[in-house]
Image (cartoon, helix red, strand yellow):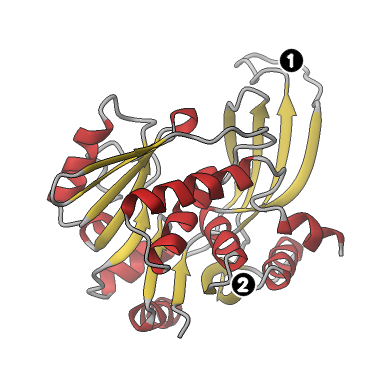
Amino acid sequence: MTAQIVLCGPASWNQLIVLDRLPEPTPHTQFAEEAWKTIGGTSAGKALHLASRGLSVTLHTALADDEPSNSIQRVLSRAGVSLASVASERTEQHVNLMTRAGERVSLYVATPSTPSKAAVAQTAEALRKADVAVIDLCELGARVLAQTPLRGIWTDLHDYDGASTFHEPFLRAAEVVFMNDDRTDDAFQLMSSVLAAGARLAVCTQGKQGAVAMNSSGERFGVAAPQATVRDTNGAGDAFMAGFLAASLAGDRVQQALEAAAEQARIAVESPHLHPVVEAALGS
C-alpha cells in the first residue's frame, strides 16, 4: 500500500528576475537579463518532487479565489498533487531578484490571511491521519501545532539559528528535521541542539558543499553535491528533503537516502522551475 503523505505549508505564484548584480540601496535603473513566472513555495516544491516519485501527496495550502491561485492549482493538478485549499483573502506571491551566482532577494508582495478555526481543524485532522505528516513554516502550520498535540512530523526549518522562538513549535513536534547552514558556522552543533529537542534525525544542507546528517545516536553522515548545470537554485532544499523522504519510504538507510536526496536536488537546480514537470504543466 502506498504511503499517504500530507503536507501543510506555502504555495505561491512568483516572478523570477535575473540581474547581473543585486540592487544597491540607492535610486537607480537596472535591466533584467531574464524573467519568468512560475509556481513557488516550499511546500509546493516538496509536493511536486514527491509526486514525481510516484507517491500519494496531498497539499494543504492557503489560496484565494484569484488568478495566481488558478495558476498554482493548474500546475499542481497536472503534476499529480492533490490539493486541499484553505480559504484566504490573498494568494501568496513573491518577486525574487536573483543573480547567476545564486544570490537572491525575495520580496513578498502578497501573503495569505489568517486561516479560520475550521480550516485549522480540518488540516490538523488530515495530518493526524497521514502516514507521513510534513509541516512547513507558515501561519497555518503554527496554528495547527498550537491547537493539536501532533508528534512525529517531518519539518523544514530552513535558516534556523538554534534560538528562534517561531521555529520552536515545529521543532518540538518533529521526528525528522531539515535545515540549511545559512545561520550557523557549525552544522553539527546546530543539529545536536535539534536532536536534543527530541528529533531522531537532523539533516543540514550546505549548498555546493552538499549536506550532512546526524541521528539521535550521534552517528554522522554526509554527501557531496553532484555535478550539475545550474539553471535556478530556488527549491533545491525542498527537492532534497523530498528525495530523502521518498528514499526513506522505499527502505533506504540514511546514507543512501542522502545520496537520493542530492540527486533530487540536482533535478531542481537544472530546471528554471521547482521541477521540470512545471514547464509542461504551464505550456499545456
Rendering coords of residue 250 (x, y %): 42, 68
Residue 68 in the image: above or below residue 186: below
For this view, does 236 lie left or right of residue 163? right
For this view, does 104 lie left or right of residue 162? right
Q: How many marks?
A: 2
Q: Quadrant of residue 283?
A: bottom right
Marks 2,1: beta carbons within 8 A: no
Q: CA distance from mark 2 to mark 1?
A: 42 Å
- Please report the residue visible at 23 percent of the width from the left and 35 percent of the height from the top: 188
Residue 241 in the image: above or below residue 96: below
Q: Which residue is mark 2?
A: 81
Q: Residues within 10 Å of mark 2 (few under 14, many from 20)?
A: many
Query: Helix or strand or loop: what does disc 2 sit on?
Result: loop
Q: Nearer the viewer, residue 168 or 236?
A: 236
Disc number placed over residue 28 in the picture, else none: 1
Query: Helix or strand or loop: what does disc 1 sit on?
Result: loop
Q: Say what amino acid the circle numbered 2 marks.
A: Val
